[in-house]
Each structure stands twice: as C-alpha cells, then as structure tokens.
Image (cartoon, helix red, strand yellow):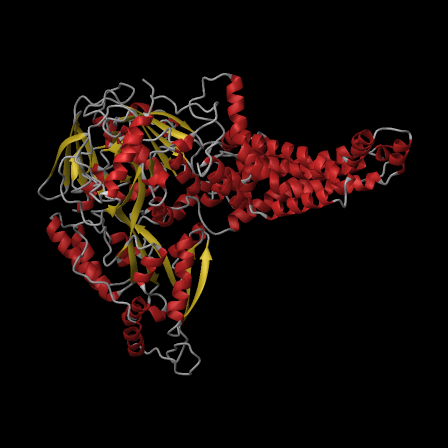
C-alpha cells in the first residue's frame, strides 16, 4: 500500500496538533510574568496594584482548562481571540505580519536552494579538487558566522555609508512610492530584499549544499549513469539531466523540513531590517506575555509543520518510482 | 521639497570647521542672548530654551521610535512612551506643566480656581475649540473622558488609581467643569489637569478598549493624525485650524526602527532628524564620526532616570542601617559612572528629579571608603570569625543574591562589579539574571535579596507610592522600607499645597533616606540625544524628553539638515523622501 505513510500522517495530524497546542498553553500559563510588559520603571505606576484583578478580568473567570477549550472551539471558526495588548483580533495581526515573512523567507528559500543545488552538484562532480575544497571551507566559515553580527556589518558597510550607502536600511519599501508604477515598486522591493535575504541565505547554504553533494555522489556511482555516459551523452547532460533528477529526491525531505521556517520568520533579521513579520510579532508577544497572539502564531506554525511533513511524505512517494511500485515507505 | 542645497551644506560645514579651528564658541551670533542653561544640561552645547534662528513654517520632522506603541490611546497604556508622545501632540489636557518652571499652564482650560478648603477645583474651558473633524469641544467631552477613565470596564487602571482622591465631578455649564476631592491632596490637581481629553462624539459609539479611534485618534491638539502603518510609521500633520499659534512643522513622522545600530546608521544617512535615548557608547562615538558630528547636536539633558540598588529589608542582614551604609561605601559609584556610563551621568544623592525644587542639594554622597565600611560592619556584628574568608555574625554567613533583569549590558557589568567590590571584603554576592516580566514579578512579591532598577522621575513627584509603608503591599515599596518618620512626612506633604513648605518636608525625607540608605543611589541618568543642527525651538522636558510641537526648521541653517549627504547616494528607484503634503 503505497499511500500508507500518508494515511498514517493524516491520522497523526489531530493528536499532534492538540498535543502541541496544549503544551504551549500550559507553558504560557505556568511561566511567571503577567501581560503588560515593561510597566515597572515608573514609580507613579500604580497599575501594579490592580494586576491580579486585571488578570481575573482578562480570563473572564474561566479555569485554565475552560480557557483552552474555549480557545479550541473558537479556533474551529478561525477565531484566534484578541490580543491582550492592543485588543485587535489575533487573526488580523497575523494577516498583517504574514506577507512580509512569507516574502522574506520564501525568497531566502529560493535563494538557498537556487545556490545550494548547483554548488552541491558541482562539488560532487569535482570532488577532491582544490576549487571544491576552497568552496566547502568557505561555506563552513559562512555557516559559523553569527547572522546578527554579519547583518550589522553589512548594514554599516553597504547601507550606512561607511563606505557605501547603496542599499536601503529599513523595511520593504521606500517611502513615497505609493503612487509609483508596479515595475518601480517591484524593483524597489527587490532592492530592499537584498540584504535581509542574503543574511538568511548564507548560513543555510552549507547544510543544503552538503546534502546535495552527498546525494549527487551516491547517484554518480549508479549503473545508469555509466550507461548514460557509455551511450555517448555529453557529460553535462549526464550530470544535470540524469544525475540531478535522481539526486533531488532526498532533497525533497529537506525542503519539507524547511517549510515551517516560512511562517516562523526570523526575529533577528526582521528586527534589524525593521520588517513587520511573524518573527517580530511572536517575539514581542513573548516579551509582553500576550497569550492569545502566542497561541495563534504557535498554532499556525504547528499546522504548517504538520502540513510540511505530510507534503514531504507525498513528495517522496511521487518522486521515487520504486516507492510507487513496491509500496516501500521512505 | 528639496531639503538641502549642496552649496549651502558645504558653506555651513566650512564655517563650522573654521569655528572649530579658531576654538570659538560654536553657538553662533545668529541667536538672541539667552538665560544661563539650567544645571545638568550638557553635551555639545545648545540650550533647552533659546531663540534658535528664524523659524521656517514648513518641513517635516522624522523621529525614530525604538518600540512600536500597542495603541494610540494612552489612557489604556499610560506608560507606553510612544503612544504618549503621539497622543500629547494630537490630544490636549486642561493644563500642562511649563517645561522650565514645571507649573501648570492653561491649555483646554483658560483658567481654574481652587477653593480655600482645597477640595473643589473649577476649570473654565476655552471657547471656540474644535476637534480635528470640525465638531466643537465642550464640557461634555471633559465629563465623558472622566466617565470613561473611571468606568471599571475600561482598561485604565493605572490612570484610574491616580484619580482615586476624586470624589465627584459635574458640568456647571458648557464651559465650566467642577471637580470635588475626597481629601486635600496637591497632586490630585496635577493629575486631573493633565488628563488628555477625548472626544465624546467619537468614543460614545463603541467600546473604549477596542475603539477604532485607538488606532486613529481625533483630538484638539496642534497636530492631526494622518496614518499609522503597523511596523513602519505614524504620521501626523499640522492642525491648520488650531485655536492657538500654529505649529511650524508641517509634518511629524515617527519611524519605527527597533535596532539601535540601524537607528544610528539611518541618522548618518540623513533618514532621521532626531534620535532619543542613544547609548552612552554611540553618543560618545558620534563626536568622532564626521557624518554625525557635523550635522547633529549631541545633547545630554533631562536626567529623568534614577539608577539604584535596593536592599530588601525583609532579609535580616539588610535590616541594620549600618550594614546598608557600609554596602554603599563599599560600592565605588564614581567608578561605575566613569566606566559603565562613560562619565556622562552624575552621582545621585536624593530621590527626586535633580533639576526640581524637591531635590535636596545639601546632601553629599557617601564616600567610597572600604575601611570605614568594614568598621561599620564590625559594629553591626559582622566579622570573619571562623577565618573562612567570608563575613559572618556567628549565626550566618554574609551571602546574598543580586537580582537583575536580562537584556541590558549595564546590569551584567554592575553585577560583576558588585561581586568583586563586595567579595574583596568577604561578602559573597551570587547573581541571578531574569527576563523582565519574571524579574518585575519577583520584585512585586518581594522575593529577592538585593536588586537594581531605574526609576523614571519627574518634577512634582509624590514619593508616597514608593516609600510609604502602606505601599509595601501592592505599591512600589519593593524593599519593604518602614521609616516611621518618613510615613508622617509623606502624609503631611500630600496635603501641603504650598510648594516651599512641601519641599521642606521632602528635603527632610531625603535626608532620612540618605542616613538610612534603604537604596544605594547610583546616578541620575541623563538622556542622550542626537538632534539635527538645522532644527530650532528645541524644548526638552522631563515629561517626555522633547516637546516636538515647538520644533522648527531654521531658515538660516536648513543646509545643516539632512537628506542628501554624500553618504546617502541612493539607487535610482528609491525616490527622495516623501514630499510634505500641502
């Protein structure tokens, strides 16, 4: 039965989701601290007095279990509740922040694999040569550089004016372009994406390209590759057409583990480049103990993770003809 | 609007360089003579109040916000810095403090009277004031605002508790409102007069906590709200129909930039005109950075922050005043200011805003004197009797935990400094770093030995909430300080309407704190800011750092402004900054 892993995955979906959200909910309620955040430093702040009263008023007198069930029931109709801090629906907050994160991490994913796949293939084909070694050492050096540090260096060097002020410093659009043509705005957007996407891409390159390299090395030793060469196909055609197609199968699994990243966002990069995305939304919700927002973003991440695992299984089944024939699970 | 003529910029730079070379005063002759700057104002010159060149009646001011406000209804979040700044431009109160004398000045109220028994306040409102949507303002709006704030379903606890002494309020006629107090309390007058008044015709429909106007305020102030792009910027436009003198700036844009390095880079590029709360490092470095030093004043002003270490008196070893005084003498506070704050702050001696009349200037800080400290500790029964290198009093060893919030390098450095300073004489300091929300909860529950925190102080500040013994439960008296005489002084001060007499009580209170040392006061933290030199009307105020509504671009010095420094060559797609509407 070839679809078995997929069916198992679907059956696991509901308990996984419940488990993850119950866990998050419990953690949030057990963690010390109260909604509101940095309200202490002003001694005139007597809000402190009413904190307990406020919390009771907030939860509407429900027990934690009741609160969770209430949340779950309302989730069925895509009602994530309201933020404790700015009182707006969590759904609106997520909808506001999601496009920027999707754009940012989506572009970074495309850039990562766009670079890692050819790099991996080339380093498999040219394995052991000096050039290949330099590239892999370089990739590992990049991998070990902390992104917040690199991002700030790039900001100062390429955007801050020492020595260059070439790239924009902040956000995803230049001010005053609301009336410009679509083309101009797209170029502007791309220009704003250069630095943040570069900062998200470079640390991910090493892992993806090494995986692609080892997958390609496996493929290069296969009989059908020798056959392809023997029948006189050009080396490029052998590698890129016959080899790469097969070496992409294991990569599908890697892609699916990267998908949750799409909605998780990156706190550090979003913060440095002032991009209003899901990473910042979640981060600020943690600092302010904004429980409904945290539950909302966690539920979203949880759903996408489960969906991504499902997709990974599907891709494995579809991409590997042997699995389709024999029904072996990956 | 082209912001800068390159020739101008070059000229002003050259003039400035010449001025520097000649070693002459940089404050040019273009400005009128001005009074002596108040004590504590330092930095790169520039007085807080001065005729700073001829004002231009247009232009945009771009200010960096380091945090995004949760809403633009500051009644709900009165402690959120940025919602308050924006709201104070859009909304108005009945009166507000003068930035220099700190006495209340008329705003929506033309004048007010206090009855001889100090229990009845009558505010006479200004006539002809209109909301930004054109509707007239009247006493109904004032009554409505107080109704909403005191409504138990409104999320206004913090403001509500400052109005606790208020017994009742009534509309006498459309232009007169009367407030009656439960008891005589001078601060209640300030509290009532400084509440921002909200429009009844807008807020009467819908819920106060979730009203759409909380994200799009309509007020009576000198600036109108234009838009708020979440995660990006809040834009205000000049109110052309303001009843008083119109603002000179046509637009104020608050740009959200969470990262401190990026904020400075934006300033260098000319994407910002004002940066508040700069770190001591960045502020000091700005002097040597040509892109910043030429175009921005480095201002060191309004020392609103008081940094202290508190000793929890529920712990037996901190109960003795001699021990606390010894601890103060063991901590080298000069060294802390010098090394951790780059020498930019002054040692604190009194629990009040340093430039206010409440501050006791006769107190001299305790010296750094480990020898004297050791003898004090010995008097209190602490010595190393068993020779293990740690002080003990026969029953227990002197070991305590210093609690501090995470995410701030200053506290890290302070913690290790405490460890080494106190460790040297045999006091073991363990440190615990906690995330802010957890840290503040531990303080409220008095679950700590010693801690450090910063209070934001302003003039006319009632210390009751922090120092009265009834504030131990539920107030901000985290260290459980119980000073019998202090309680009496604070109670007396609350009913004393005469500023001089009240200040005398507060001076005495400060002296007791100095002798008792419940806190080891470290320093008064100055605000460090960078402000474009093309700006004038630069008012600083302990109530919110700057008063932006009075800022303007100078006619003579617009070249020193921003926008196209050589460092900001931009890609062809990125247009110059948005033109000022209308």
User: Can residue B395 be seen here?
Assistant: yes
What residue is shown at x 91% (from left), y 29% (from top)?
A: A231
Residue B331 found in image quarter: bottom left
Could you tell me residue A274's position as x and y percent?
47, 35
User: Can residue A282 be seen here?
Assistant: no
Residue A301 vs B131, above or below: the answer is below
Residue A196 found in image quarter: top right
Q: Classify the position of the C terminus of chain A by image quarter.
A: top right
Could you tell me residue B365's position as x and y percent?
23, 63
Could you tell me residue B87's position as x and y percent?
31, 32
What residue is shown at x 44% (from left), y 80% (from top)?
A: B388
The answer to which of A234 and B478 lies nearer the viewer is: A234
Counting every numbered tag in the picture gives 0
The answer to which of A22 and A43 lies nearer the viewer is: A43
The answer to which of B211 and B392 lies nearer the viewer is: B392
Could you tell me residue B547's position as x and y percent?
25, 36
Q: Classify the position of the N terminus of chain A by image quarter.
A: top right
From the viewer's perspective, tell me whether residue B128 is left or right of residue B316. Answer: left
């Amino acid at each position: 039965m070839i679809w078995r892993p997929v069916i198992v995955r679907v059956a696991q979906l509901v308990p996984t989701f419940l488990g993850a959200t119950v866990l998050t909910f419990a953690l949030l309620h057990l963690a010390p601290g109260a909604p509101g955040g940095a309200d202490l430093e002003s001694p005139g702040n007597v809000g402190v007095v009413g904190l307990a009263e406020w919390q009771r008023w907030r939860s509407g007198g429900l027990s934690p279990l009741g609160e969770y069930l209430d949340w779950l029931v309302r989730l069925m109709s895509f009602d994530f509740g309201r933020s404790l801090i700015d009182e707006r629906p969590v759904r609106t907050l997520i909808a506001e922040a999601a496009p920027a994160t999707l754009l940012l991490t989506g572009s970074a994913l495309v850039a990562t694999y766009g670079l890692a796949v050819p790099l991996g293939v080339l380093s498999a084909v040219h394995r052991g040569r000096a050039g290949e070694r330099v590239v892999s050492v370089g990739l590992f050096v990049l991998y070990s550089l902390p992104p917040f540090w690199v991002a700030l260096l790039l900001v100062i060097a390429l955007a801050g004016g020492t020595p260059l002020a070439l790239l924009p410093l902040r956000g995803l659009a230049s001010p005053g372009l609301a009336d410009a043509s679509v083309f101009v705005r797209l170029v502007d957007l791309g220009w704003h994406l250069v630095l943040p996407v570069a900062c998200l891409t470079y640390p991910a390159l090493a892992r993806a390209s090494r995986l692609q390299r080892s997958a390609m090395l496996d493929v290069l030793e296969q009989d059908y590759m020798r056959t392809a060469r023997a029948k006189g196909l050009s080396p490029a055609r052998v590698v890129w057409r016959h080899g790469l197609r097969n070496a992409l199968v294991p990569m599908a699994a890697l892609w699916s583990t990267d998908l949750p990243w799409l909605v998780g966002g990156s706190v550090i990069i979003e913060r440095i480049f002032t991009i209003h995305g899901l990473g910042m939304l979640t981060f600020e919700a943690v600092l302010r103990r904004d429980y409904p927002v945290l539950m909302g973003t966690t539920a979203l991440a949880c759903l996408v993770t489960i969906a991504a695992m499902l997709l990974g299984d599907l891709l494995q089944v579809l991409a590997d003809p042997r699995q389709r024939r024999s029904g072996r699970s990956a | 609007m082209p912001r800068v003529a390159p020739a101008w910029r070059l000229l002003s730079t050259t003039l400035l360089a010449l001025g520097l070379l000649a070693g002459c005063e940089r404050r040019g002759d273009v400005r009128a003579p001005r009074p002596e700057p108040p004590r504590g104002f330092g930095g790169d010159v520039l007085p807080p109040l001065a005729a700073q060149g001829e004002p231009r009646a247009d232009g945009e001011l771009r200010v960096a916000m380091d945090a995004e406000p949760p809403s633009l209804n500051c009644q709900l979040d009165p402690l959120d810095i940025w919602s308050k700044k924006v709201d104070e431009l859009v909304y108005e109160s009945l009166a507000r403090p003068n930035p220099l004398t700190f006495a209340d000045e008329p705003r929506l109220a033309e004048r007010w009277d206090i009855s001889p028994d100090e229990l009845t306040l009558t505010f006479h409102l200004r006539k002809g004031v209109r909301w930004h949507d054109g509707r007239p303002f009247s006493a109904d709006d004032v009554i409505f605002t107080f109704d909403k704030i005191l409504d138990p379903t409104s999320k206004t606890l913090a403001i509500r508790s400052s109005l606790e002494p208020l017994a009742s309020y009534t509309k006498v006629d459309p232009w007169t409102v009367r407030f009656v107090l439960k008891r005589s309390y001078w601060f209640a007058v300030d509290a009532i007069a400084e509440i921002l008044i909200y429009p009844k015709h807008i807020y009467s429909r819908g819920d106060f906590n979730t009203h759409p106007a909380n994200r799009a305020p309509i007020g009576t102030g000198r600036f109108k709200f234009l838009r708020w792009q979440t995660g990006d910027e809040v834009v205000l436009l000049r109110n052309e129909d303001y009843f008083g003198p119109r603002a000179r700036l046509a637009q104020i844009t608050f740009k959200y930039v969470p990262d401190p390095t990026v904020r400075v880079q934006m300033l260098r590029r000319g994407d910002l005109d004002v940066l508040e709360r700069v770190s001591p490092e960045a502020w000091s470095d700005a002097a040597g950075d040509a892109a910043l030093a030429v175009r921005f004043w480095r201002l060191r002003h309004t020392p609103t922050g008081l940094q202290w270490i508190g000793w929890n008196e529920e712990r037996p070893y901190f109960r003795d005043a001699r021990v606390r005084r010894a601890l103060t003498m063991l901590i080298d506070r000069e060294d802390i200011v010098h090394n951790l704050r780059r020498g930019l702050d002054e040692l604190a001696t009194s629990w009040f805003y340093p430039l206010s009349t409440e501050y006791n200037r006769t107190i001299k800080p305790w010296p750094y004197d480990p020898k004297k400290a050791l003898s004090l500790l010995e008097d209190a029964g602490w010595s190393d009797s068993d020779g293990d290198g740690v002080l003990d009093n026969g029953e227990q060893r002197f070991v305590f935990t210093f609690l501090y919030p995470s995410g701030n390098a200053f506290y890290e450095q302070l913690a290790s400094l405490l460890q080494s300073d106190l460790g040297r004489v045999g006091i073991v300091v363990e440190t615990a770093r906690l995330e802010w929300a957890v840290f503040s909860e531990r303080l409220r529950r008095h679950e700590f030995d010693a801690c450090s925190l910063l209070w934001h102080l302003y003039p006319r500040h009632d210390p009751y909430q922090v120092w009265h013994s009834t504030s131990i439960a539920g107030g901000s008296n985290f260290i459980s300080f119980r000073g019998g005489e202090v309680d009496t002084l604070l109670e007396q001060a609350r009913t004393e309407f005469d500023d001089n007499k009240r200040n005398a009580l507060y001076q005495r209170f400060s002296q007791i704190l100095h002798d008792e040392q419940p806190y080891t006061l470290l320093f008064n933290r100055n605000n460090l800011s960078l402000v474009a030199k093309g700006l004038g009307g630069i008012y600083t105020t302990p109530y919110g750092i700057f008063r932006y509504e009075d800022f303007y671009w100078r006619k003579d010095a617009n070249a020193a402004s921003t926008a196209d420094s050589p460092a900001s060559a931009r890609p062809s797609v990125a247009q110059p900054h948005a033109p000022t509407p209308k």
